[in-house]
Amino acid sequence: MKAITYRGFGPASDVLELTDIPTPDPASGEVLVRVHASGINPSDVKLRSGARPGAVMQFPTIIPHSDGAGVIEAVGQGVDPARVGERVWIWNGQWQRAFGTGAEYIALPSDQAVHLPETTSFAEGACFGIPAMTAWYALYCDGPITDQTVLVTGGAGTVGRYACQMAALGGARVITTVSSDEKAAHSGASEWINYRKQDVAQAVMELTDGAGVDRIVEVDFAANQPTSLALIRPGGTIASYASASQMKPELDFYGFMFKNVRLHMLIVYQLDAAARRRGEAQLGAWLEQGALSHAVVPAGNLTNAAKAHAMVEAGQKLGTVVLEV
């Protein structure tokens, strides 16, 4: 099969190669998926570049990308043969595994290939594993959010855009922060604040008549900590999936303590099985209803992998960069 591989960390144009490697066979409990689309997330490019602290090559050869979508072509022992021919989306394809979705085929545990409705394209399905499930978990990890007020920071981002939609679908009031009118439109949220032109804390308090918000879906914990503390209601939750501006921020412990705030630092790779099943079921229901829209940034095919990685690293795209396979 054709696959994008790398054998060492470095710039995408230097280390990514299109190679021929043997097509895998599904082991017991696994399925073999013919990949039709491979999603590229910031975590994928950071892994390839060696940007993570203490990064080491865990495997001699790596096929990148954790997200993707395709069709099951074969199953291993113990997997229902009726799954052959099923359209699926993939999660954790390259999490603690050597071979991800940047190839024509991937063999992985059966539960990591989730049913994809006919009404959803493979490219859209390649956005679910990290962006959509991160948004769902940040919102619903501890129960329903009906009638809550939710602030989504960075509503034009891949996670933020899904979070704006999912919060509204859950019966919450949604406010988001963006940096331009274009990004406000992309977020889809009806209430938004331009954080480059407005004081976010003041604007949110005005919108909520001084009440603040029940939950914050946070894209940069360190950068927004003072604002978040000012806005969060007593007993509220801040669910943060990144802190790129400062990886080891100084925590205003007593500030949060005296408001009885729950801080949830989350990573979608580590969802427990029960939570993931709930998320998959909810996402599947929304997809069947046609309730979600998806922001796909087409980036060509496997031969364009290096350019696609560069698009993600540049950070200017609006949506998830996806390769056709």
Image (spheres, helix red, strand yellow):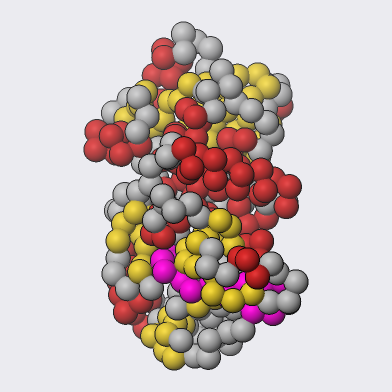
Determine if residue 187 is in view: yes
Above-or-below relation of 216 to 204? below
View extreme (top): residue = 209
Relative image position of residue 144 (x, y in whole percent): 64, 28
Above-or-below relation of 220 to 143? below
In the picture, measured across the screen, residue 164 lies left or right of residue 254, that is: left
Relative image position of residue 181 (x, y in whole percent): 24, 33
Above-or-below relation of 268 to 186? below
Quarter where residue 206 is shown = top left
View extreme (front): residue = 82
State yes or no: residue 275 in magenta.
Answer: no
How many numbered marks have been drawn onto this rendered protein structure?
0
Find the magenta span and give its range. 26-39
Quarter where residue 185 is shown = top left
Q: Give the quadrant of the C terminus.
A: bottom left
**In terms of secondary structure, what is the magenta stretch mainly?**
strand
Quarter where residue 306 is shown = bottom left
Q: Residue at x 66, y 43 (%)?
A: 278
In the picture, measured across the screen, residue 217 lies left or right of residue 40, that is: right
Q: Residue at x 48, y 43 (%)?
A: 287
Determine if residue 265 is in view: no
**309 or 205: nearer the eye?**
309
Q: Residue at x 35, y 76 (%)?
A: 302
State yes or no: residue 31 in magenta.
Answer: yes
Q: Residue at x 35, y 24 (%)?
A: 190
Relative image position of residue 165 (x, y in whole percent): 44, 34
Relative image position of residue 9 (x, y in whole percent): 48, 79
